Amino acid sequence: MKKGLIVFLGIIIILFLIYASKWYMYISGLDEQSDKWYKEEYVEKEFKGKVKYMQMFDDNPYKIIISIDDGSEFDINYGVTCVDKEFIDFVEIGDSVFKRSEEKAIKFTKDDKKSKIFELNFCGKFK
């Protein structure tokens, strides 16, 4: 009886370890995909266009979703990113946008040529 219980517990532990390792591999894969997206679609990307829309996320004015019309078939959409009061006070729909490849900073320019540079930080998700 005792030997059967030990075997049963051993099987349960082995199954749990297999499940945990699969879950870890899945989560690690998501992080790798996320880092790849950040590098390819933000850091390495060069674009110019106009702010198409900015939407507050989760009723928090300092968390936004921003879309940039760069003239291509699909807009450039960046999910939740955290911004500061200066960004909120300055950037508006219709502002011109310019970002160089391999730089994280984006230059936002108004019609009157006033410009400010901001970096989308994706709420600290990426370094």
Image (tube, helix red, strand yellow):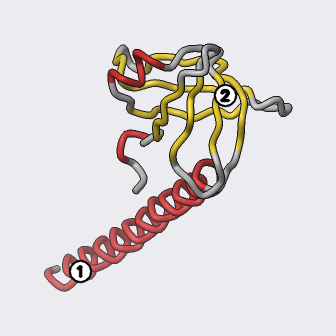
Picture residue at 55% right of the left edge, 39% below the top: 106
For disc 2, the neighbor class at 10 Å (few under 14, some 14 to 19, many from 20) is many
> Which residue is under mark 1?
4
Q: Are marks 1 and 2 in contact (CB under 8 Å)?
A: no
- Quadrant of the rendered image containing residue 75: top right
Q: Nearer the viewer, mark 1 or mark 2?
A: 2
- In the foreground, 42 or 21: 42
Disc on res. 68? 2
* Closer to the camera in the image, 18 or 124: 124
Helix, strand or loop at label 2? It is: strand
Residue ID at (47%, 68%): 25
Q: Nearer the viewer, residue 95 or 120?
A: 95
Q: Tell me which numbered mark, 1 or 2, is placed earlier along the sequence.
A: 1
Please state the horizontal and vertical placement of residue 99, each as a whole percent of the image. Answer: 63, 42
| Horizontal side, residue 125 vs residue 110: left or right | left
Work out how far the residue at label 1 is from the one at label 2, CA to CA, in angstroms. 64 Å
Q: Which amino acid is tagged 2?
A: Ile
The spot of residue 125 in percent (x, y) is 39, 48
Please give left or right for residue 20 compared with residue 6 in the image: right
Residue beneath the point at 52% across and 58% down: 35
